Every structure is written in C-alpha cells, then in structure tokens.
Image (cartoon, rainbow, N blue to C red):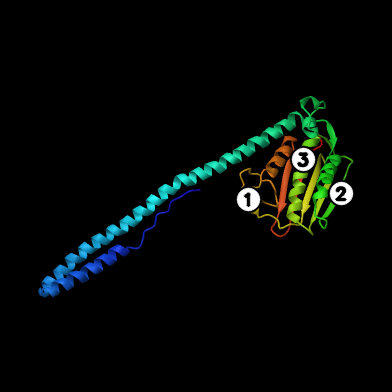
Amino acid sequence: VYEVRFARVPRAGLIAGGALGAAAGLLAAVGLGASLGGALAAALLAASLGAAAGRGLDLARQLSALAGARRAAPEILQAANGALAEKMDELAKLAARLDAAESHPSGLASGRGADAASQPLRRRSSLAAAVTRAVDSLRPGLPRDLELDVALQEEGTSIPCDAFQIEQMVLQLLRNAATAAGAGGRVGVTLRAAGEAAEIEIEDDGPGIDQEVVDRIFDPFEASQVAGAEQGFGLPVSYRIVQGHGGELRIESEPDRGTRVTAILPLR
C-alpha cells in the first residue's frame, strides 16, 4: 500500500515574518522621527510584507515535500512490482510441479520420465503407508529431544488417491509442525477412520497462530512465515492437494496453545 498523507504544517514562516516585519518597521519609523501614527502605519506595512515573505517560505517547504513524495513513488512501485514478479514466478513453478505430479505421479516420485507412470492416478492406496513414508523421511532431521507421537489406523483408511501427493502433503504439514514445536516440543500424527472419510491429524504444542493469520493462511501471497512454515506456499499447495481429492483441510489454532491441522479425505 502506497499513500501520501497531506497535513497542515505550522505557519511558522507566516508568524515569524509578520512579527519581524512589524518590529523592523516600527524601529525604522521611530529612528526617522515619525509620529506615532506614522510609526504604526510603517509597522503594519512592514508586517504585511514580512508575513507575505514568510508565507512564501511555508509554501516552498510544502512543495518541496510533495516533490520528494513524487520522486519516491516510482521507486516504491518498482520495488513492489519486482516482489510481485518473484511471487508469480514461484507460483508458476509450483503449479507446474503439481500439474506434473497429477499427470505422472510415479515418474516424479522416482525421478524417471512420463513412461514410468503406468498405474491409474486414483488407485486405492493405504494412507497409513503414505503417512509412514512421510514420517520416516522427516525423522532423521528432527531434533533429538522433539517428541513425535504417531498413531495410525490401517483398517478402513485406504482411499482412491495419488499416494505421492498425499505423502508430500503430510511431509509439508509435519515439517511445519516440527519447526513450530522446536526442540523439546511435541508433534502428534494421527490417522483414523471417521464415517465416510479418513482423517490425518497433525498437531504441535508450538506458539500457535493468531486468528487473523489463520483466516489468511492459505493465501499464497501471505508474506509472513506462520506456524514455523519454511515455505510460504506449503500450506496453499497442501490445500490444493486435499481439495483435488475431494477433501477438506481444517486448521485450529490459538496463540500459546499450539496448532492442529486436519486433512479430511473421503473414502470414495
């Protein structure tokens, strides 16, 4: 947001010019031996001239400030345009990666080409296996004193899904939770069947998130790092993955009381 605020400045020049002019005119008239009436007239005339000169100085200061604001505007807009261009580039790259994963998940997972994707995109897969792979890949990099509790229900939690995308979504959420909890903290991972859906719940005992930030947490342009997120686009991409599976991503958080993120994925 760029704005210029105009405010009425103190009329220092006007007041000072008028006062100095009146004093100079009065002293000059008295020095020349003018009468009282003549001295007052001279003082008023000099005060008017001095006030005009002082007012001109006030206006010059205002115009100078306005010129400075005009010179600063292009620089500010150029900086904002550069930042926006960087964000758009990041969005384009992530969208391309995600589109590629949707089209050729097996190829991306193994680093091979598109011919490696021989399985259907939405074959029924075990969510427990996907969560386990995400936990195992992240565990070596966690602090030794970070408590990680994992409770996975295998029965009734296999769904038609892109297992690679689910694994990446869980990995991102786990990384955010571990960063928020920090050394000595706790992260809990739970998988359970809930009616016609399976729920993946990841919670931490970190500092939590303000409600104002929670309302904007899926915005890719949210600049601040929230809940220890290492990537500003991690949560929006996770949201897109869950949404692409017909599910819902919920976030519950309060300052100083931790954060709980729940991915609800339909069984059919």
Dot 1 amino acid type: Ser
Does label 2 or label 3 sit earlier along the sequence?
2
The residue that disc 1 covers is 224
Q: Position of residue 87 (x, y in %)?
A: 60, 41
Dot 3 amino acid type: Gln
Extreme right residue here?
155
Q: Secondary structure at mark 2?
A: strand
In the rendering, which numbered label is found on residue 150?
A: none
Residue 247, above or below 16: above
| Gap in angstroms between the C-alphas marked 2 and 3 | 19 Å
The residue that disc 3 covers is 168
Q: Closer to us: mark 2 or mark 3? A: 3
In the rendering, which numbered label is found on residue 151?
A: 2
Residue 161 seen in render: no
| Gap in angstroms between the C-alphas marked 1 and 3 | 22 Å
Extreme top residue here?
115
> Which quarter of the picture shows residue 245?
top right
Q: Residue at x 80, y 55 (%)?
A: 143
Residue 13, above or below 66: below
Q: Secondary structure at mark 1?
A: loop
